[in-house]
Image (cartoon, rainbow, N blue to C red):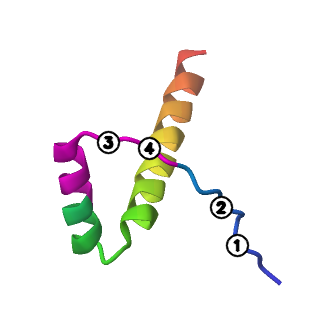
Amino acid sequence: MNQKPLKEKVSVSLDEDILEKCKKLAQDDDRSLSQYINLVLRRWIITKEKRNKKDT
């Protein structure tokens, strides 16, 4: 049986303009704000890790 990864609640402060853009993009992508931010961070981390591997 596949289990979803564990999630942990956190609190962050975002600039108002960033929050509004994220809300709009999440809505356009038919996702909750939380799901959208998680997706964006995951993609950014993967990209960053790939770049770091190229540099080594």
Residue 14, numbered circle: 3
Q: Nearer the viewer, mark 3 or mark 1?
A: 3
Of 40 and 20, the residue lying toward us: 20
Q: CA distance from mark 1 to mark 2?
A: 9 Å
Q: Looking at the image, is 40 positioned above or below residue 51?
A: below
Q: Residue 1, how many percent across, how many down?
A: 83, 84
Q: Amino acid at mark 3?
A: Leu
Q: Looking at the image, is 10 positioned above or below residue 24?
A: above
Which residue is disc 4 drawn over?
12
In magenta, the rendered stretch is 11-22
Instruction: Indicate the secondary structure of the residue bearing disc 2.
Output: loop
Q: Amino acid at mark 1?
A: Lys
Q: Is residue 14 rendered to the left or right of residue 10? A: left
* Residue reaching furthest to the right: 1
Which quadrant: the C terminus?
Answer: top right
Q: CA distance from mark 4 to mark 1?
A: 23 Å
